[in-house]
Amino acid sequence: MAENTEKWRSAFLLFDRDGDGEIQMDQVGTVMRSLNQNPTQEEVRNITEAIGTDTITFEVFETIMQENSKEVDAEAELREAFDVFDKDGTGNISTAELRAVLTTMGEKLFQEEVDGVLKLVDNDGIVKLEDLLQTLLNPPKK
């Protein structure tokens, strides 16, 4: 939990522009999204209404995060994203498709990062889902 608290504090401080230890309530959803949470507009509105003030301290934000954080199932999300490009359901996509996805969608990777991933999963121009999952979820130790 201490690891989460430090991540939350770092994100909070980025939005505490004047250094007074508070952020505006209308920034809560943005800060949560910067922490890989995806609250709906309604969830943010409910949080805002429940707090009932224009600003919050980190301690209040920490409580909000503890109550509203959702664990992300990285493997399920990767499988779902992969399936979009695996149109024939073989568990394979082309290396070119994966390169395009990694450099243009979501959290874009740099060419060097993509080259590093592809070096580990490219099998004659084809990427197997299971190899990609293994590489991304259990990277080799340096």
Image: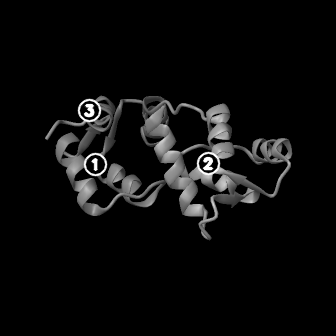
Type of amino acid under label 2 = Met
Residue with the most extreme front position: 20
Residue with the most extreme bottom position: 18
Type of amino acid under label 1 = Thr
Expressed as whole percent of the image width and height from the top left, the position of residue 46 reads 82, 42
Residue picked out by circle 1: 95
Q: Is residue 123 visible?
A: no
Closest to the observer: 47 or 128? Answer: 47
Please tell me the numbered disc located at residue 32.
2
Q: Is residue 61 visible?
A: yes
Type of amino acid under label 3 = Asp
Number of other residues with Cα within 10 Å of mark 1, as a class: few under 14, some 14 to 19, many 20 or more: some
| Mark 3 → mark 2, Cα distance in angstroms | 31 Å
| Mark 2 → mark 1, Cα distance in angstroms | 33 Å
Expressed as whole percent of the image width and height from the top left, the position of residue 81 reads 47, 40
Left or right: where 33 falls relative to 81: right
Q: Secondary structure at mark 1?
A: helix
Closest to the observer: 27 or 109? Answer: 27
Expressed as whole percent of the image width and height from the top left, the position of residue 128 reads 29, 34
The mark closer to the camera, 3 or 2, is 2
Residue picked out by circle 3: 131
